[in-house]
Image (cartoon, helix red, strand yellow):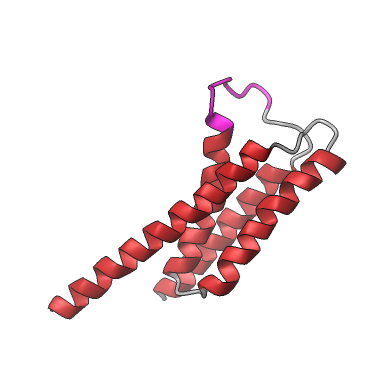
Amino acid sequence: MRRRLLITLAILAGVIQVVGLYRPTGIEGAPAIPGLDKAAHLLMFGVPVLLLLLAACRRRWVLPVFAAHAMVSEVIQHRFLPSRSGDPYDLLADLIGIGLATLAAWLITRRNRRRVAAE
C-alpha cells in the first residue's frame, strides 16, 4: 500500500514536472524572486526521484532516466519553445535536485533500517 502511494505521488510529481518544463511560456505574473526558477527546477526533479527511491524503485534506472530527462528538457526548451531558453544553470539545478533526493532517500532508508533492527 505504501509503495503504491509513493509511486502514485511520483507520477503526479512527474506530470507537474512535464507541465512546468514544456509549458510554452513562463508563468505570467510570477514574482521576480532571484533564484526561484532554480529552486523550482531542483524540486521538479528532486521530488519524483525521492518518491521513487523511497518506493524501492531501482536507482540504476531512476537516476539515469531523470538525469537524461534533465538534459533533454533543456535542449527541447532551447530548440522548440521560442519563448523559453535552454539554461545550463537550470540543468545544474535539476542534477542537484536529483543528487539531494538520492542522498535524502539513502538517509531515510538507513534510519528506517536502524529503527527496525533496534525493535
Check if residue 13 falls in the magenta segment.
no
Question: Which is more toward the observer, 81 or 63?
Answer: 63
In the shown orientation, is residue 78 left or right of residue 63? Answer: right
The location of residue 59, given as percent across then percent down, is 52, 71
Question: Which is more toward the observer, 87 or 40?
Answer: 87
The location of residue 81, given as percent across then percent down, is 83, 38
In the shown orientation, is residue 82 left or right of residue 101? Answer: right
What residue is rendered at 61% in x and 56% in y? 14
Q: Can you tell which quarter of the image residue 21 is in?
A: top right
In the shown orientation, is residue 53 left or right of residue 21? Answer: left
Vertical comparison of 14 with 62: above or below? above
Vertical comparison of 75 with 14: above or below? above
Q: Can you tell which quarter of the image residue 68 is in?
A: bottom right
* On-image quarter of the C terminus: bottom left
The location of residue 46, given as percent across then percent down, is 51, 52
What residue is rendered at 53% in x and 65% in y? 8
Vertical comparison of 31 with 80: above or below? above
Q: What stretch is highlighted in magenta?
A: 28-37
The location of residue 19, given as percent across then percent down, is 69, 46
What residue is rendered at 42% in x and 76% in y? 1
Vertical comparison of 14 with 90: above or below? below
What residue is rendered at 42% in x and 67% in y? 54
Q: Can you tell which quarter of the image residue 34 is in?
A: top right
Dominant secondary-structure state across the stretch colored magenta = loop
Check if residue 34 falls in the magenta segment.
yes
